[in-house]
């Protein structure tokens, strides 16, 4: 049984430090626009399966990435599916902003909607540089891969911090075995 949140501890590297990627891997990992839109364009039926949505404490690293003093955040973990095939495991960390009215933050009430459908509609969205990591076949993320009946292999992921006005949040996306990235 998978325990949430799934740890995405890894050797995250800035794009300037990353080498040895294929053109296809670079195309997917460094996609500057909505990954959701890109996945939708390559499938007949796109869907989101919510695995977990709970409040957890932020790690010191996450607080540093988000430049925030918040101690907790809503952690949302989902699988993005194309034609019923798991393609991406995504994890978002939405800090608890005590000054913000939660009922007016659409990111805190997503349901089965993909985050990308909401955030990329806002012209004030700002994204930090994308960081890349490799998750080997021994990484704890592989437990989820096994539960999805996918073959264990090294996986590639990306993360970045987004800002909507003054609200910052962290998004991590890991491409699962069989994703378009590996074709």
Image (cartoon, rainbow, N blue to C red):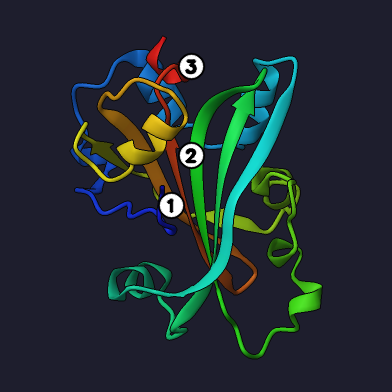
Most extreme residue toward the bottom is 99
Q: Which of marks 2 and 3 is in front?
A: 2
Mark linked to residue 89: 2
Quadrant (top left/top right/bottom left/bottom right) for the C terminus: top left
Neighbours of disc 2 within 10 Å: few (<14), some (14-19), many (20+): many
Residue pointed to by mark 1: 160
**Does 82 sit above or below residue 127?**
above
**Left or right side of 55 for 176:** left
Q: Nearer the viewer, mark 3 or mark 1?
A: 3
Mark linked to residue 146: none
Mark linked to residue 180: 3
Quote the CA–CA distance across marks 2 and 3. 13 Å
Quote the CA–CA distance across marks 2 and 1. 15 Å
Q: Which of 2 and 9 is in front in this view?
A: 2
Dot 2 or dot 3: first in sequence order is 2
**Left or right side of 1 for 136:** left
Q: Residue visible at 64% across and 15% down?
A: 42
Question: Do the numbered discs 2 and 1 sit on residues whose CB atoms are within 8 Å?
Answer: no
**Does 69 sit above or below residue 147?**
below
> Which corner quadrant of the image does residue 63 belong to?
bottom left
Most extreme residue toward the right is 103
- Name the element at disc 2: strand
Residue 26 visible in this rendered orientation of the protein: yes
- Name the element at disc 3: helix
């Amino acid at each position: 049984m998978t325990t949430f949140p799934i740890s995405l501890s890894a050797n995250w590297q800035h794009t300037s430090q990353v080498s040895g990627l294929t053109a296809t891997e670079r195309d997917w990992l460094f996609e500057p626009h909505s990954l959701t839109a890109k996945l939708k364009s390559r499938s007949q039926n796109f869907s989101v399966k919510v695995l977990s949505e709970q409040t957890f404490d932020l790690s010191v690293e996450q607080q540093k990435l988000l430049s925030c003093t918040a101690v907790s955040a809503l952690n949302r973990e989902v699988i993005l599916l194309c034609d019923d095939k798991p393609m991406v495991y995504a994890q978002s960390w939405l800090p608890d902003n005590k000054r913000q009215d939660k009922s007016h933050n659409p990111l805190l009430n997503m349901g089965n909607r993909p985050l990308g459908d909401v955030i990329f509609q806002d012209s004030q969205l700002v994204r930090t540089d994308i960081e890349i990591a490799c998750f080997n076949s021994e990484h704890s993320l592989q437990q989820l891969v096994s539960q999805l009946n996918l073959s264990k292999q090294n996986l590639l992921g990306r993360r970045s911090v987004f800002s909507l006005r003054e609200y910052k949040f962290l998004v991590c996306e890991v491409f699962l075995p069989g994703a378009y990235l590996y074709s």
